[in-house]
Amino acid sequence: MSYNNKIGWRFDNTYSKLPSSMLAKLSPTPVKAPELVILNHSLSKVLGLDFSSVSDKNLASIFSGNLLPEGSDTIAQAYAGHQFGHFTMLGDGRAIIIGEHLSKNNKRFDIQFKGSGKTPYSRNADGRAALGPMLREYIISEAMHGLKIPTTRSLAVVKTGENVIRETPLHGAILTRVAESHIRVGTFQYAVIAEDKKNLKTLFDYTINRHYPHIKDSKTQAIDLLKIVIQKQVKLVVDWMRVGFIHGVMNTDNMAISGETIDYGPCAFMDIYDPETVFSSIDQNGRYAFFNQPGITKWNLARFAECLVPLINEDKNTAIKIATEVVNNFSEIYKKNWFEMMRKKLGLSGEKIKDEQLIMDLLTWMHKNKADYTNTFCFLMNQNLEKNKIYNDKSFLDWKKQWKERLKINNNSPEESLKLMHSNNPFVIPRNHKVEEALEAANNDNLNPLENLIRILENPYEDKKKINEYQSPAPPSDKIYKTFCGT
Ligand code: AMP
Ligand code: MG
């Protein structure tokens, strides 16, 4: 039997049939001595794939791209994007999509190798990736999935047996990323400036067909698409704000039209609540700081709207006017969704005028008192955290009294209210020091901390025993946590 039949790959490649200027056809560059580091069994099941009869050696060959499955049609996608506000031509410089796999219920997924060698879009870089960042994407993307936040997922990581040269030589690695698609705002930006003016409409039709076929017959498709993408991105960024996630590099090429979180580079979760938190070493001006994320989402959506202008109305000025109005609704929609989310975090049901003040007062208190964002909500859910005396602070107790009063006028039971809190406040997040600990051990061939961390993050809303060590913020140190991009 061929590997395909045993494993269950069902490729049906459509993107590779788009105009040739939108992609490059090429194979992953073979690697010297691939070795499997981790394989995601639960994701395999979701995809309808079964790797149980494949030897470790063959798994390593498959997930390094040395042994391509039948039916694959390997491409690198072209795209452009605003990086930190500056427009640049980009494209998959170190990634190859091997094809679109259909799961048993015919859901379509891009299967992409990240770190698989140079492409025509590599510019001066090596097309490769290091083990640490690929495992980091694995951990955080799977944690996001556990948190029930839309995200690309990670199927496997292999070491390549080759070094990549960064500041020092590092283990080379390849991540297999699974996504609803890799169509980005930047893909539209690329199509708009293409020599062939038909490319934009082709990409637009393709996107609607693939993601939002229910608007296929609409007479206002372009504005419908814009509204859908706005809704999706509002929901996404509200989810990020809910759990304290900082993406770190919200360039337009890293915003997916599907509404999934994509491209885990310098991202990290905030411990102490500080709206100005920035982890990325290259984000000198805090463009992508925690509290800037909604504003940047809107900015990116405005860039998307600009791409759609020729499809909104024949008259450019009319089109711009319509698009501007729609994008300007973002702030109100965001605000409404954000307050709704914060109410849920506090177990409040129904809307009361004073809720906004109650929410803002808590955040102000957390900021002033350097309270841990995640653990403060765990504390309010009565979780027995190791004694933390900041919660005896008078101003916090005063706030808590008001909150308790507000809970009394909920239009649901205390049990329902607690349940609401439990489904919106995680007990565990990927704490930076635990992520670093797992990566360092994995770099030295000890996979236990990595596997334990991933297991804990699978069900972050469950109040499990023995999770204390995953709940504490990093021990105090002089060093500010920094993350690095594109490594
Ligand atoms: P990112 O910051 O990961 O979104 O990447 C931005 C752009 O740089 C994308 O076009 C990537 O494909 C490209 N890129 C990042 N790292 C590398 C690398 N090591 N080799 C080639 N291209 C890269
Ligand atoms: Mg990117």
Image: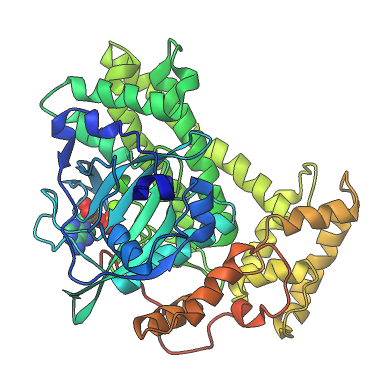
Residue nearer the viewer, 294 or 17: 17
**Residue 279 falls in which quadrant of the image?**
bottom left
User: Where's residue 255, x and y in %?
Assistant: 37, 45
Residue appearing at x 31%, y 45% in the figure = 252
User: Where's residue 221, x and y in %?
Assistant: 41, 17
User: Where's residue 63, x and y in %?
Assistant: 32, 59
Left or right: 70 with respect to 270?
A: left
Quarter of the picture containing the C terminus is bottom left
Residue appearing at x 78%, y 66% in the figure = 381
Colouring method of the image: rainbow
Left or right: 99 with respect to 208?
A: left
Number of marks in picture = 0
One can see residue 255 in this view: no
Residue appearing at x 13%, y 63% in the figure = 126
Position of residue 390 relative to residue 205, above or below, is: below
Residue appearing at x 30%, y 31% in the figure = 14
Residue nearer the viewer, 316 or 471: 471
**Residue 345 falls in which quadrant of the image?**
bottom right
**Residue 306 falls in which quadrant of the image?**
top left
User: Where's residue 118, x and y in %?
Assistant: 13, 56
Position of residue 448 relative to residue 149, above or below, is: below
| Residue ranking furthest to the front | 1
One can see residue 320 in this view: yes
